[in-house]
């Protein structure tokens, strides 16, 4: 049994801004289910919600400040949660990273710098918890200083750093290194310095004993200039200690057999019932209710990463085809306006809902025939896995986790019972449109389509699978 300290800035259901929270909510639970002794450490944000009781554990003194450590538990699990309670840094309204105007909190370097220092104190068993981890598992830039600071300690635990998205690096002016009182030993271009800036993520990439990212393909991609943001050389240098482990999904929350948010539950054996969800989506989005027209959907952040510009470019040509398209998302205001304009122009074919709506997301996954994910890059991606579990055929660009979790439909993959979606190569609207047309041809062949749906629904996207791989990694450190 390993003792694991899991360090993260968000974890569902305590606090969530994106996919990072899904992973950091599920993976510790899955490790606990494999009988590991795991504690999660996270800042005590104002918006953090827990249904479990919270108790005071101890007080730590770091940088002339007194910080309280509170203890609670992840709902429905044996995972202990340590809350780093420092109201001057974390008791703000809104989001963990940005203010109500969407601007990063001006003291983010200090906030997450302090969080990292506390994690180090706990990791070194200086928090009087009588518990010393074997492994400290850190996630994304907010935790990057932990492996760096631990590298200076004697008799330290092993460290793992997981990259959930290379696009976010925690870059701050170089002066922050002195303000944070970071040891001079860490401040050089082969350390935390990145073009005279302080880079939190480099703390993980340079100093962690092992680096993982959330899919094997993304682990290779980030070693290239296109995806590495100037850190590809460093990642390539460390490739011996870098690998990819694909995320799992929460099979209870995303289960078409029991999903309370959908109009009609169904299984691979009762696929015909999926149609009722399609009608419900069409009704909710005020589109003509028509069972035979192929219905395409998209849910996600409306940002360039997700290829939303390709969708905007493609839609005027898509409306010439016999299809419907629904979208749920929010993000870039320019994309929101462009999409709204197209929906207003073609109300019989395109309908959009701007905002975040968990229950509608479930209904869309259950109701559409095919789910679009033309991402420019995608470290892992969750929606393409949810889609497959719901017998909804994903159309994905061949990148990152999309490439690793969707099998393109070809005569040979149909024969091998592995075909589960449509994969296209280039990030341009022509390739996307071609993929949509290819999907429509398959949709018109009910036998082939049903085979694809069943292949998709039978795939194993469980966390147990991924947690076992992390455990092997911990054991081999
Ligand atoms: P990322 O973390 O890059 O945003 P992922 O596909 O890994 O992308 O995870 C996104 C998660 O957020 C999924 O669970 C997705 O369904 C959900 N999501 C994104 N936008 C919305 C929205 N507007 N309404 C409901 N759920 C959303």
Image (tube, grey):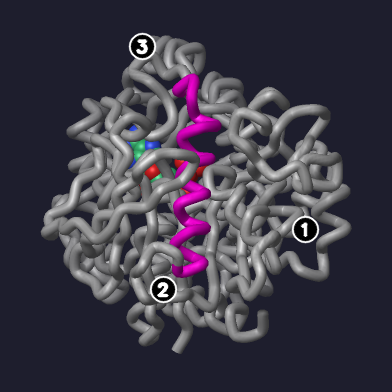
Magenta part of the protein: which range? Answer: 105-125
- Residue 70: percent from left, percent from top: 25, 55
- CB of mark 3 within 8 Å of CB of mark 1? no
Question: Marks 3 and 1: which is nearer the front?
Answer: 1
Question: Mark on residue 220?
Answer: 1
Query: Which residue is disc 3 drawn over?
Result: 344
User: Mark 2 and mark 1: span between their CA atoms?
Assistant: 23 Å
Q: Is residue 60 left or right of residue 176?
A: left
Q: Earlier in the sequence, mark 2 or mark 1?
A: 1
- Decide which of 63, 271 is in the foreground and name it: 63
Q: Residue at x 30, y 44 (%)?
A: 85
Query: Which residue is disc 2 drawn over?
Result: 462
Question: Marks 2 and 3: which is nearer the front?
Answer: 2
User: Mark 3 and mark 1: span between their CA atoms?
Assistant: 42 Å
Q: Residue at x 26, y 50 (%)?
A: 14
Q: What is the secondary structure assignment of the residue under circle 1?
A: helix
Question: Mark on residue 29?
Answer: none
User: Mark 2 and mark 3: span between their CA atoms?
Assistant: 40 Å
Q: Earlier in the sequence, mark 2 or mark 3?
A: 3
- Decide which of 391, 85 is in the foreground and name it: 85
Name the quarter where the N terminus is drawn: bottom left
Name the quarter where the C terminus is drawn: bottom right
Q: Considering only vertical position in the picture, is 375 above or below 411?
A: above
**Which quadrant of the figure has residue 95?**
top left
> Magenta includes 83?
no
- Decide which of 158, 464 is in the foreground and name it: 158
- Residue 443: percent from left, percent from top: 47, 53
């Amino acid at each position: 049994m390993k003792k694991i300290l899991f360090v993260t800035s968000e974890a569902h259901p305590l606090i969530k801004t994106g996919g990072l929270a899904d992973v950091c909510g599920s993976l510790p639970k899955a490790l606990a289910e494999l009988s590991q002794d795991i504690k999660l450490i996270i800042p005590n944000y104002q918006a953090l919600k827990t249904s479990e009781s919270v108790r005071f554990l101890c007080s730590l003194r770091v940088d002339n400040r007194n910080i309280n450590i509170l203890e609670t538990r992840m709902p429905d699990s044996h995972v202990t949660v340590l809350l780093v309670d420092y109201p001057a840094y974390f008791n703000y309204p809104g989001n963990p990273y940005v203010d109500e105007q969407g601007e990063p909190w001006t003291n983010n370097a200090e906030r997450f710098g302090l969080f990292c220092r506390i994690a180090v104190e706990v990791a070194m068993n200086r928090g009087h918890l009588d518990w010393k981890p074997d492994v400290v598992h850190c996630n994304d830039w907010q935790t990057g200083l932990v492996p760096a600071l631990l590298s200076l300690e004697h008799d330290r635990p092993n460290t793992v750093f997981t990259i959930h998205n290379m696009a976010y690096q925690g870059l701050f002016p170089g002066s922050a290194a002195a303000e944070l009182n970071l040891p001079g030993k860490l401040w050089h271009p082969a350390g935390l310095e990145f073009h005279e800036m302080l880079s939190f993520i480099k703390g993980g990439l340079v100093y962690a004993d092992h680096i993982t990212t959330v899919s094997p393909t993304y682990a290779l991609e980030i070693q290239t200039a296109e995806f590495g943001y100037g850190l590809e050389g460093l990642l390539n240098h460390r490739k011996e200690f870098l690998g990819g482990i694909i995320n799992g999904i929460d099979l209870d929350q995303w289960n078409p057999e029991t999903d309370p948010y959908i109009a009609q539950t169904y299984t691979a054996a009762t696929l015909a019932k999926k149609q009722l969800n399609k009608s419900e989506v069409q009704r909710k989005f005020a589109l003509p209710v028509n069972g035979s027209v192929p219905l395409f959907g998209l849910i996600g952040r409306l940002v360039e990463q997700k290829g939303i510009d390709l969708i905007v470019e493609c839609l005027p040509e898509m409306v010439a085809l016999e299809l419907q398209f629904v979208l749920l998302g929010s993000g870039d205001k320019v994309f929101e306006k462009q999409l709204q304009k197209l929906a207003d122009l073609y109300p019989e074919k395109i309908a959009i809902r701007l905002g975040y709506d968990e229950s509608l997301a479930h209904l869309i996954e259950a109701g559409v025939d095919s789910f679009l994910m033309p991402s420019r890059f995608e470290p892992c991606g969750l929606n393409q896995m949810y889609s497959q579990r719901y017998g909804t055929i994903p159309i994905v660009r061949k990148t990152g986790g999309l490439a690793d979790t969707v099998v393109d439909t070809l005569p040979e993959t149909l024969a091998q019972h592995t075909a589960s979606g449509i994969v296209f190569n280039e990030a341009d609207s022509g390739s996307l449109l071609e993929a949509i047309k290819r999907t429509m041809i398959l949709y018109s062949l009910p036998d082939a389509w049903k085979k694809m749906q069943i292949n998709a629904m039978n795939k194993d996207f469980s966390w147990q699978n991924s947690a076992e791989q992390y455990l092997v990694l911990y054991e081999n450190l």
